[in-house]
Image (tube, rainbow, N blue to C red):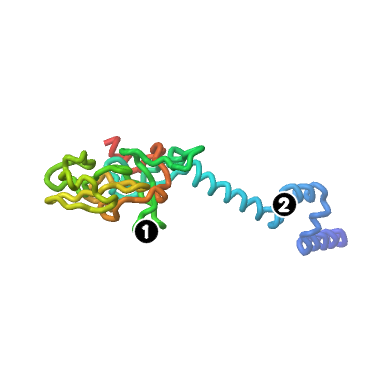
């Protein structure tokens, strides 16, 4: 009995000291081979391809972005509503001329003040429009002029040039640019500050709101 007990203890010690002895069991070996991760050299190219595909999809098809800040109140919550944006509506297949946004559309664009930052704004003026820079002055709420707002000799303003008439400032939207403004006029940095925005800086059109922030959801319930 003593000799048998000693033999058992030696076997246990050998098992602890040499975990690789588990490889002697065929079932364990098959399990290890089945669930063993592939080598890094095989994973790296696939990971790069996946990331490149996701980037290509988000920049050319659609992506979901969060909107934070007060500039688009009450349309979007300051806490971060998530919206679906896509550049597809502005693609021109078979023509060299790019389709531009239309008045009233919400778009995502690179900020002219900081191109690393994106902004969500509403399109107020497009190419050729005569825009009043600050329509709140004088108690009016008018953005696009019809030519009667200026004298006959002043109706052909140079595109992008600001013209002053009394308290009003007017600008003619030049080719390849749009006039972007936040819905919350009292607290929005937009084209009234940095001027018309080139179409090349417009990332895409806001197609839908896919989720509401907790703050806006509570306001709706209330």
* Apparent side of residue 141 relative to residue 54 in the rendered image (left or right): left
| Near-viewer residue (165 or 142) | 165
Where residue 99 appears, x then y in whole percent? 42, 40
Tell me the quarter of the picture where residue 89 sits. Answer: top left
Question: Which residue is farthest top?
Answer: 221
Q: Is mark 1 on a helix, strand or loop?
A: loop
| Near-viewer residue (51 or 78) | 51
Residue 186 visible in the snapshot? yes
| The C terminus - image quarter | top left
Q: Name the residue under label 2.
A: 36
| Near-viewer residue (3 or 47) | 47
Q: Would you say the residues marked 1 and 2 are in contact, meaning their CB atoms lie under 8 Å apart?
A: no
Residue 190 visible in the snapshot? no
Q: Residues within 10 Å of mark 1 (few under 14, many from 20)?
A: few
Q: How many labels does the image show?
A: 2
| Near-viewer residue (152 or 163) | 152
Which residue sits at x=25%, y=53%? 161
Q: Is mark 2 on a helix, strand or loop?
A: loop
Which residue sits at x=26%, y=55%? 193
Query: In the rendering, which numbered label is found on residue 165?
Result: none
Query: In the rendering, which numbered label is found on residue 114?
Result: 1
Q: Earlier in the sequence, mark 1 or mark 2?
A: 2
* Apparent side of residue 19 relative to residue 170 in the rendered image (left or right): right
Which residue sits at x=33%, y=46%? 178
Where residue 190 appears, x then y in whole percent? 29, 51
Where residue 214 appears, x then y in whole percent? 35, 43
| The N terminus - image quarter | bottom right
């Amino acid at each position: 009995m003593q000799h048998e007990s000693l033999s058992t203890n030696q076997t246990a010690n050998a098992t602890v000291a040499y975990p690789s002895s588990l490889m002697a069991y065929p079932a364990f070996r098959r399990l290890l081979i089945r669930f063993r991760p592939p080598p890094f050299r095989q994973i790296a190219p696939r990971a790069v391809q996946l990331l490149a595909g996701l980037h290509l999809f988000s920049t050319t098809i659609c992506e979901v972005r969060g909107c934070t800040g007060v500039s688009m109140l009450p349309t979007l919550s300051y806490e971060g509503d998530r919206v679906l944006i896509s550049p597809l509506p502005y693609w021109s297949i078979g023509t060299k001329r790019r389709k531009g946004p239309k008045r009233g559309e919400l778009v995502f664009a690179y900020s002219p003040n900081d191109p690393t930052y994106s902004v969500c704004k509403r399109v107020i003026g497009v190419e050729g429009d005569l825009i009043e820079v600050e329509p709140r002055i004088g108690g009016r709420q008018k953005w696009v002029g019809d030519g009667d707002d200026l004298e006959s000799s002043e109706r052909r303003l140079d595109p992008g040039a600001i013209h002053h008439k009394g308290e009003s400032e007017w600008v003619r939207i030049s080719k390849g640019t749009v006039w972007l403004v936040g819905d919350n006029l009292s607290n929005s940095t937009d084209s009234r500050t940095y001027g018309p925005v080139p179409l090349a800086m417009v990332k895409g059109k806001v197609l839908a709101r896919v989720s509401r922030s907790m703050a806006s959801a509570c306001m709706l319930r209330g």
